[in-house]
Amino acid sequence: MKGRIIRLSLLVLTAFTFSPRMAECQQVLDRILAVVDDDVILDSEVSQGAYLMAMQMRIDPAKSPQQFERLKSETLTSLINQKILLVQADKDTVKADDQQVDRYLQQQMQNVIQQLGGEDKVEEYFGAPITKVRRNYREEIERNLRIRTVQSKKMEGISVSRREVEAFYKAYKDSIGPIKETVDLSHILITTKPGESATRAAYDKALALKQRVAGGEDFAKLAQENSEDPGSAGRGGDLGFMARGEFVRDFEEAAYKLQPNEISDLVKTQFGFHIIQMLERRGEKIHTRHILITIKPTLEDEKVAADSIKAIHANLLAGASFEELVGKYSEDVSTKEDKGYLGHFEIDQLRERAKEFVFAITGVPAGKYSDPVKTQYGFHILRVDGREEPRELSFQKDYESLQKMALDMKTQKEFNTWIEELKQFVHVEIKDQIAR
């Protein structure tokens, strides 16, 4: 419950323009559903949030309209609570850590791109350029981190007694149901990184295009034919008007130095090599277009990563500390601080999300390691921290899980009470009902 209800997820609930596939559920884009303090919640925000939740939960809105309406209702409540807590964050002058924002942004974009099947599919789904999608995600992640900080400080002292856990068990054991087959996993991740030859090849390709631009060829046409940014290539590399903070740092520094119609030297960012053309300035906003050449790892680069993971695996089998190797080598920043811990998964759910993992850990006992396994993220070694066969729920065996569930429920009640208290000092008005 705490993960699904109390903790405001970093799932972003932003007001993107919908794609044509969303048009049936989009009656009036700017219809105001609620007002919180001096901010409004639009029908488009609620619908978009519900679509994002549906995507993560694998719910088809067209086939499950009642479930989708429930998601919209939950989204509206969540957005109201978020805005109330954001008012409190403003009062407490809570700030978000920029590095943490960047890390979550990278993870969120990777997840959405992977789920939808590419950046072009993301643009089609949201009906917006990838730059706008990224910008809205970043703004919302920053707000959500501030909200989560305020919320965590308020909820951190809550606990439950054994008597409370026992009462929870008696009341909810039938609805909780039996324990399914589960597994606890940790991992070490090695990504495939472009080497010198891949970097040189991308640089040479970008330099040749820069020379063609300098020779008088049409920038927009070259972008359409050569740029590897699917979000802007079709528009001749046009990124539209954007403000400071909406670009990655190296791109922004180079772009803001340009004068109208001036073209940059090659600019390297984490995405590759860019050629930037300044089109227009309006105060602190700039209108640019670019050509992007990405740095693609070669087969040799992939072999380097594969050799690295094999060497790490050999060290583990020889008795090396898994935790020390995680700290030294793993490239998954989201799990490194937790010594590589990925989480507790039901096997059926894991099969849907990462079938390669299920194959890799088949027959691997608790405390042992899988052979290296390749996924779209790179090469992994999985450690099976624990396994649980399907069985009936037990108060004694499952006390820790029951304690967490009871704590989650108690925290939820405390959270709801707190929100109602905050509402006494924040103007909240429901202006319209969700369209059905």
Image: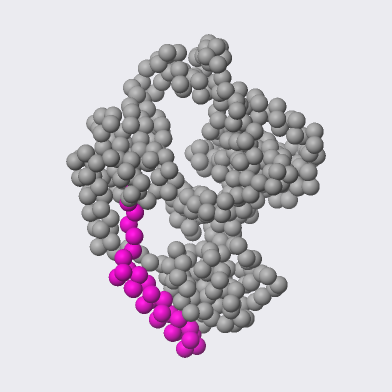
Specify the quadrant that holds the C terminus.
Answer: top right
Is 363 drawn above or below residue 176 in the view shown? below
Give the quadrant of residue 416: top right
Kindly tell me whether residue 60 is visible in this rendering. no
Give the quadrant of residue 203: bottom left
Q: How many marks?
A: 0
Residue 195 picture location, percent across and down: 31, 65
Kindly tell me whether residue 102 is visible in this rendering. yes
Is 182 drawn above or below residue 207 in the view shown? above
Q: Nearer the viewer, residue 212 or 202?
A: 202
240 relative position to 359: left or right: right
The residue range painted magenta reads 189-217
Residue 196 located within the stretch drawn in magenta: yes
111 relative position to 243: left or right: left
Q: Residue at x 70, y 43 (%)?
A: 92
Q: Main secondary structure of the magenta part?
A: helix
Residue 390 picture location, percent across and down: 36, 21
Residue 172 picture location, percent across and down: 54, 15
Q: Which residue is drawn at 51% across and 82% down?
A: 218
Specify the quadrant that holds the N terminus.
Answer: top right
Residue 294 picture location, percent across and down: 41, 67
Q: Which residue is drawn at 66% across and 69% down?
A: 285
Residue 334 located within the stretch drawn in magenta: no
Q: Nearer the viewer, residue 131 or 69?
A: 131
